[in-house]
């Protein structure tokens, strides 16, 4: 009956398997192996379904023991590992022993997972070939995953697992999970059950996690045993020996079990037939066909053709196994017949099966690494040669603890980043206390407030990164150094605050129209806590800002604006421009962070005030009004920051240097031998660098270097500390007109030359 | 008298000024269309926000934020028109083209912040999934989709189209390209449709609409309300993926980094853009070196300033003796190859001038001339390892002295022969790379 079924299932996947490879249709030589592979995989699915039924009556350890015993028997018979081949050393025996132990543990996990979440889900999760899992892991944990296709495959795999975890309403199992203590057979299963219960997930979800773990173990196990199998003399011999050893290993345990526990099995005799089929289908046939196919075909092709039929037949069997046709088989096998349809097909399982098929197909396809290689030259025949080793050697990986230690050291080196870091820690601590307490008391308000705090922390994290990066050394791409990142980060933080103000504004307008009833008793302690944390932050940051403001900014800043941050929210909208804020002590990054903390503080104050108003007077309108007010305050306090950052980003002439620069330029014109100047550009690059470029025209008899020295001196006094001067004589223009062939350039050059001739003593007008 | 205007404070109020600038822009007929679209966009966004609150769907909200992003892109387009009309003022000595970059950066960052907000909202919704009303969900989706596509395809948005082409591809684009490549493997006829680089905005609009349709279907069929949250997260992630490369690109412009397309050519020429400090030997002809360097660089950089250092201005013949604080670390000495000097060894004085990258305005705005420059043909390209430049400094003087007095005319002759093989290309470059007046 199952044979017929298997043939039935084969028709689908066989056709599908042929259609899978669009470009390279397998040649006739390979076709028979592919058919054999598909057939075996379908039989394996049948075998696993049957073993699930068997596991209902037989204890899992006993089941594995019988399985291993049967396999060992057949394999010793076929392979003759003791009589043929070279002798095995003592050292190798120890390795085989280890191999057997690991194999036992993995099959224990596997079949325990089978009992937990049913054969269909087990097949979906566990029956992936090594290459699929390896490429999945390489996408997840290494940077060079192998292109977007692999990433997509990995995403599909994860989506499929998530579908099984979240969208699979396996109701019957959930019912069983309510009293899992009832039918525990041994200490081992009890231990696993407690572990799953500790994780706080339902039984079948625990089974899903267990199977994922077992899958990873299996892949690692296969990779590790590859060397041993060569040493011993072939994978088959190793398998045979290992099975024998594991039978010996499991033997005492099974004896103890059968002595202490009373068996649920009524007659072992009736189980011989199903056990034989399971041993053949799941262990022996699968192993041999796999090894043949991996020799005859590529590994990736093998994996592709193997995974598809097994997943499809699992789906089909999952749908039809409970039908009357197979019910006869079940009644024959099962001692206690109970009417149940457990681990049925659900929408989530179907979706996840589709995703598994897709991901197995994508991940097992050979990766096109050709794009990644670097061209190193051409061979004598003219074919290009690529170097693929590049990224393996270039990435010198740093150990994680050392990396953390180094970056911590960097953070703590300077006051800015130290302040932000400490405050971030405090904030995170508060957030996690809030989240933990929220989970403990099951209060949604607390948890969502915790998420809100986490959202706010992202601004702090960005500020921290900017403060760190701004101290990096200049590279060829960032040729001035990274100081400007602070300004950009300040700008982003300003935008962030505007977004927050906008959302608060919208929310409060919506509440003004339709004021909701509020439950105020939970809000107060949280907001008081938040207020305290933020007040600490404000104190720390404002101290840092008045403290660090002198030395960091150089010589030319007026310091009387340093304390106006606290009040500018109220005072600033009166008069439009406030250039004094630029360079007023704090850099843009710290100002952004400070304003963020300020906004949070305002929020906490607003909540407290509105709570008091609601509780005392019952004014429910107070809450939206408060938030409206806060939104306006945040917005007004951010505007100067955004404006200043914009000016710096637009390369504006630094306002605080305007006067000095004007005087300096007038001075430059009076330098002896200087005819005129053009293209004077001055801009603030970062908090500490004011850069400038200027072209000066001089008479032919002047020494260039002396002029450069003089002009540099004058402009340095004006506060420009990164200066480039181009000294042009008449000869320069002649050279240029000679060098360039374009008509426009010659025109421009002659114009400039004329200006040099005519404006001998006047000012040069741009 | 440009410098005098430095201190004239703006007298008018901000609002009046804004109105004036707005009139300036509105005088252009092209901007009418943008304004019309802006009004339509505002109205539709208002309706969409209402529907968002009535359906209680966070996925639709995430999609609406894309509409708001369209509004920002329209504003950016207006700004780029305004920028074209403005001349550099004394205070903003480089002109206002950077404002365009800033606008692009701000709008992409705002879109990402909106996506971050959506992520936060969805995290809260995972805890307690509210009920979604599907009433206006599909209507809202199609209104937003048609609005987005209409705006993106009918308006020629110069800054955004430039950025989306110049920035690295987003992951969404990469996946679509990968899929369409394999699709074209089956049906080769489709290659003309699918193989060119997809517009990232159109892509994200379509993908978001698709996610919303799935949401609608699943909620209608099965009341899976969690799908709404999931697709909101998907849309937010796609927004991140699309906007991130663009904000990185424009942020790098704002950070005054050396643009990547210039760096390859600069590697050949020398190492920096903007203003450059060149160190030469004491006996080289400064003006000639200056002319050479300028000539080489100003096809790449529009606003160029070259400063020349002589080592021995203060301390004679000391290579490691920096002249000013500007030239602090001579970590990378690169040799400027000069065409004339290739053939004759005795003209080495100029080749032995290590250039110190100092910096300034590497990429000022998006369409700096460097973008379209085809590589300048180099006659003597050599990138010497560290230390070679130093060694040059110690080579005996007698080698160089002959080349010093090369008269201007003689030099020009040599250069002309050097460049005759690329006259047309060079000429066209020069037009793009004309120095700012």
Image: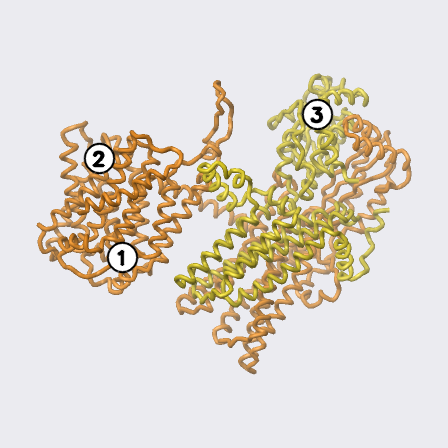
Chain colours: A orange, B yellow
Circles 2 and 1 on the same chain: yes
- Looking at the image, residue B12 sits to the left or right of residue A539; the answer is right
Q: Secondary structure at mark 3?
A: loop
Front residue (pair A473, B3) = B3
Q: Chain of mark 3?
A: B
Q: Residues within 10 Å of mark 1 (few under 14, many from 20)?
A: many
Which residue is at the far front? B189
Q: Secondary structure at mark 2?
A: helix
Q: Residue at x 80, y 49 (%)?
A: A660
Give the Cα separation between the discs numbered 2 and 3.
71 Å
Give the Cα separation between the discs numbered 3 and 1.
75 Å
Can residue A219 be seen at all in this image of the molecule? no
> Residue A338 location, x and y as percent?
17, 61
Front residue (pair B69, A202) = B69
> Residue B352 location, x and y as percent?
69, 24
| Above or below: residue A552 compared with residue B295 | below
Q: Name the residue carrying label 1.
A: A343
Label 2 vs label 1, nearer the camera: 1
Q: From the image, which quarter does the C terminus of chain B lie in? A: top right
Q: Secondary structure at mark 1?
A: loop
> Residue B296 location, x and y as percent?
71, 30
Front residue (pair B324, B149) = B149
Q: Chain of mark 2?
A: A
Q: Residues within 10 Å of mark 3 (few under 14, many from 20)?
A: few
Give the Cα separation between the discs numbered 2 and 1.
36 Å
Circles 2 and 3 on the same chain: no
Marks 3 & 1, CB-CB < 8 Å contact: no
Marks 2 & 1, CB-CB < 8 Å contact: no
Q: Name the residue carrying label 2.
A: A238
Q: Name the residue carrying label 3.
A: B422
């Amino acid at each position: 009956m199952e044979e017929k079924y298997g043939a039935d299932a084969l028709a689908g996947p066989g056709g599908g398997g042929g259609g899978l490879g669009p470009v390279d249709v397998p040649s006739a030589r390979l076709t028979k192996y592919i058919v054999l592979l598909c057939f075996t995989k379908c039989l394996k699915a049948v075998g696993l379904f049957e073993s699930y039924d068997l596991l209902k009556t037989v204890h899992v350890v006993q089941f594995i023991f019988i399985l291993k015993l049967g396999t060992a028997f057949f394999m010793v018979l076929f392979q003759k590992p003791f009589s043929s081949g070279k002798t095995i050393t003592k050292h190798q025996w120890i390795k085989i022993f280890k191999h057997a132990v690991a194999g036992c543990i993995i099959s224990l996990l596997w079949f325990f997972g089978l009992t937990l979440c049913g054969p269909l889900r087990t097949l979906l999760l566990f029956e992936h070939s090594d290459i699929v899992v390896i490429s999945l892991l390489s996408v997840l944990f290494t940077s060079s995953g192998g292109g977007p296709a692999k990433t997509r495959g990995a995403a599909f795999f994860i989506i499929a697992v998530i579908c099984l975890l979240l969208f699979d309403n396996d109701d019957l199992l959930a019912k069983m999970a309510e009293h899992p203590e009832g039918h525990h057979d041994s200490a081992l299963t009890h231990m696993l059950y407690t572990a799953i219960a500790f994780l706080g997930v339902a039984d079948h979800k625990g089974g899903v996690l267990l199977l994922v773990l077992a899958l990873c173990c299996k892949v690692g196990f296969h990779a590790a045993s590859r060397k041993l199998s060569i040493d011993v003399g072939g994978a088959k011999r190793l398998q045979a020996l290992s099975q024998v050893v594991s039978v010996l290993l499991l033997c005492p345990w099974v004896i103890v079990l059968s002595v202490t526990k009373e068996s649920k099995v009524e007659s072992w005799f009736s189980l011989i037939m199903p056990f034989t089929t399971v041993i053949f289908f799941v262990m022996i046939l699968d192993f041999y066909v796999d090894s043949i196919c991996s020799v005859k075909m590529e590994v990736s092709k093998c994996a592709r053709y193997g995974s598809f039929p097994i997943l499809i037949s699992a789906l089909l069997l999952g749908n039809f196994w409970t039908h009357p046709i197979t019910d006869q088989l079940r009644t024959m096998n099962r001692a206690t017949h109970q009417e149940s349809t457990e681990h049925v097909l659900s929408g989530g399982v179907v979706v996840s099966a589709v995703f598994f098929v897709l991901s197995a197909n994508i991940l097992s396809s050979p990766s096109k690494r050709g794009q990644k290689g670097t061209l190193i030259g051409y061979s004598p025949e003219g074919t290009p040669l690529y170097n693929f080793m590049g990224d393996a050697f270039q990435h010198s990986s740093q150990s994680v603890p050392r990396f953390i230690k180094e970056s911590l050291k960097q953070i703590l080196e300077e006051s800015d980043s130290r302040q932000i870091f400490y405050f971030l820690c405090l904030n995170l601590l508060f957030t996690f206390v809030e989240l933990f307490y929220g989970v403990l008391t099951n209060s949604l308000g607390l948890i969502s407030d915790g998420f809100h705090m986490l959202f706010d922390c992202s601004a702090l994290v960005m500020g921290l990164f900017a403060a760190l990066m701004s101290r990096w050394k200049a590279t060829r791409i960032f040729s001035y150094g990274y100081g400007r990142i602070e300004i950009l980060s300040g700008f982003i933080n300003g935008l962030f605050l505007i977004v927050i103000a906008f959302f608060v504004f919208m929310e409060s307008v919506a509440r003004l129209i339709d004021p909701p009833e509020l439950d105020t008793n939970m809000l107060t302690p949280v907001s008081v806590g938040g207020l305290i944390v933020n007040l600490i932050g404000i104190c720390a940051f404002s101290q840092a800002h008045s403290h660090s403001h002198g030395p960091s900014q150089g010589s030319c800043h007026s310091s009387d604006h340093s304390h106006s941050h606290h009040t500018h929210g109220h005072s600033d909208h009166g008069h439009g421009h406030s250039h004094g804020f630029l360079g007023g002590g704090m850099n843009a990054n710290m100002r952004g962070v400070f304003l963020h903390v300020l906004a949070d503080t305002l929020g906490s104050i607003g909540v407290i005030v509105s709570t008091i108003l609601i509780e005392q007077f019952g004014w429910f309108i107070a809450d939206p009004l408060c938030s409206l007010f806060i939104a306006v305050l945040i917005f007004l306090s951010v505007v100067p920051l955004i404006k200043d950052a914009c000016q710096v980003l637009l390369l504006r002439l630094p306002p605080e240097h305007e006067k000095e620069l004007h005087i300096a330029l007038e001075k430059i014109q009076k330098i002896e031998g200087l005819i005129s100047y053009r293209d004077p550009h001055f801009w603030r690059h970062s908090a500490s660098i004011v850069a400038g470029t200027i072209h000066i025209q001089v008479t032919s008899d002047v020494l260039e270097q002396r002029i450069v020295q003089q002009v540099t001196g004058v402009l340095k006094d004006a506060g420009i500390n990164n200066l480039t001067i181009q000294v042009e004589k008449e000869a320069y223009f002649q050279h240029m007109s000679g060098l360039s062939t374009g008509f426009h350039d010659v025109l421009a050059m002659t114009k400039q030359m004329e200006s040099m001739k005519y404006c001998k003593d006047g000012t040069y007008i741009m | 008298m440009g410098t005098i205007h430095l201190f004239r404070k703006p007298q008018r109020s901000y609002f009046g000024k804004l109105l004036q600038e707005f009139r300036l822009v509105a005088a252009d007929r092209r901007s009418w269309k943008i304004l019309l679209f802006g009004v339509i966009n505002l109205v539709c966004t208002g309706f969409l926000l209402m529907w968002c609150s009535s359906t209680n769907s966070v996925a639709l909200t995430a999609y609406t934020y894309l509409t708001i992003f369209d509004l920002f892109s329209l504003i950016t387009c207006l700004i780029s028109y305004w920028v074209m009309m403005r001349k550099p003022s004394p205070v903003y000595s480089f002109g206002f083209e950077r404002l365009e970059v800033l606008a692009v950066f701000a709008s992409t960052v705002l879109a990402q912040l909106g996506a971050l907000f959506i992520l936060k909202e969805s995290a809260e919704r995972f805890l307690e999934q509210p009920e979604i009303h599907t009433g206006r969900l599909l209507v809202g989706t199609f209104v937003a989709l048609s609005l987005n596509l209409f705006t993106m395809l009918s308006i020629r948005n110069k800054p955004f189209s430039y950025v989306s082409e110049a920035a690295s591809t987003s992951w969404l684009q990469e996946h679509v390209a990968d899929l369409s490549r394999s699709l074209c493997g089956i049906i080769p006829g489709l290659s003309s449709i699918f193989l060119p680089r997809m517009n990232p905005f159109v892509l994200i609009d379509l993908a978001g609409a698709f996610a919303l349709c799935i949401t609608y279907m699943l909620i209608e069929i099965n009341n899976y309300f969690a799908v709404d949250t999931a697709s909101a997260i998907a849309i937010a992630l796609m927004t991140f993926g699309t906007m991130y490369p663009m904000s990185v690109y424009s942020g790098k412009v704002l950070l005054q980094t050396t643009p990547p397309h210039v760096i390859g050519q600069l590697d050949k020429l020398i190492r920096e853009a903007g203003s450059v400090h060149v160190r030469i030997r004491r006996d080289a002809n400064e003006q000639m070196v200056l002319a050479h360097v300028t000539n080489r660089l100003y096809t790449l950089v529009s606003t160029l300033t070259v400063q020349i250092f002589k080592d021995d201005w203060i301390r004679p013949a000391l290579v490691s003796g920096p002249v000013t604080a500007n030239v602090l670390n001579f970590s990378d000495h690169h040799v400027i190859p000069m065409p004339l000097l290739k053939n004759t060894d005795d003209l080495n004085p100029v080749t032995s001038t290590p250039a110190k990258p100092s910096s300034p305005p590497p990429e000022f705005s998006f369409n700096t001339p460097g973008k379209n420059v085809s590589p300048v043909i180099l006659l003597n390209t050599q990138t010497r390892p560290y230390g070679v430049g130093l060694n040059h400094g110690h080579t005996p003087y007698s080698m160089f002295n002959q080349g010093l007095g090369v008269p201007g005319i003689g030099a020009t002759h040599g250069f002309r022969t050097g460049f005759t093989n690329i006259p047309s290309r060079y000429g066209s470059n020069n037009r793009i790379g004309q120095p700012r007046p």
